[in-house]
Image (cartoon, rainbow, N blue to C red):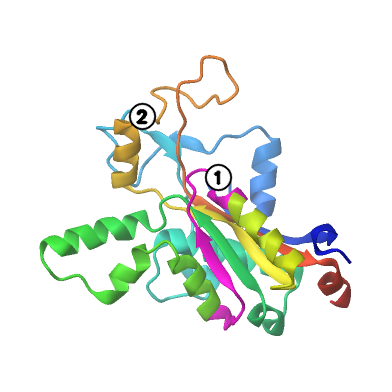
Amino acid sequence: MNSSRRRIFITGMGTVCPLGLHVSDFWKQLIAGQSGIAPIAKLDTSGLRNQNGGEVKGFDWQEYGEEGDCDEASQFAFAAAVEAAKQAGLSEENLRATGLVYGTNFGGAASWEAVCDLAREEIVDDETFRQFLPDHAAVYTASRWNSTAPRATLSNACSSGTHALGLAADWLRLGKCETVVAGGFDGLGLSTLAGLSILRTISPDALRPFDKSRNGTLFGEGGAMLVLESEESMNRR
């Protein structure tokens, strides 16, 4: 089959977001017309252009059997990837051969701020430094799944997650992998929100992207992943 015409299927989905900690919760809230935008409680946003954003609530890292240190944004990515893999029915053997393509705008924003605080005291440790790197989430996922397949992390502002899906599709069509987990993730950080506020990217009032009077956007946190799979791999399983 011509590689450019190779059929690709979505066999699993996962999410951790302001509308819910699983795909089923997210979908129920979405079709009910609910919004995940609300006053941000985890940060002091008093000096920002807008105090609202999309904040994940009720997330428990230990529910995923994880207890080690991991940046919060990477936790969202990993949790979403785990849900997507379970929905797809991927075995441990499948996971070892599953590629990873993650997209992120800011990566570990909270860990970046921690690194800056520690740098002032000249006591930055290697683990904290690693956690703020944009590829930390993909590296963490690969290590937990013992994956030896290709992996990549992209950062193209708000299109990062979509670009990740496109690259994953390219990998499948080129035969680099038979299965890829791809999507986007981000965490809320005061430094990034402050920068966006100064740039006036953040709307001073409401998020309304399709309104002729739109005046900016609002930012949130979470992770959303899809399992993309070749038709041959899907049929074999």
Residue bearing mark 2? 50
Q: Answer with left or right where residue 126 lies relative to residue 175.
A: left
Quadrant position of the N terminus in the picture: bottom right
Residue lying furthest top in this view? 213
The amino acid type, in three-letter code, at marker 2 is Asn
Q: Is residue 17 above or below residue 217?
A: below
Other residues around mark 2 within 10 Å, as few (<14) / some (14–19) / many (≥20): some
Taking the spot 45% from the left edge, 21% from the top edge, the residue there is 215
Q: Is residue 163 above or below residue 41?
A: below
Q: Is residue 138 visible to us here?
A: yes
The amino acid type, in three-letter code, at marker 1 is Ser
Where does the image place residue 175, in percent across and percent down from the top left?
Answer: 74, 72
The mark nearer the N terminus, 2 or 1, is 2
Taking the spot 34% from the left edge, 70% from the top edge, the residue there is 130
Residue range highlighted in magenta: 144-162
Residue bearing mark 1? 159
Please tell me the numbered disc located at residue 73.
none
| Element type at mark 1 | loop
Quadrant position of the C terminus in the picture: bottom right
Taking the spot 59% from the left edge, 74% from the top edge, the residue there is 150
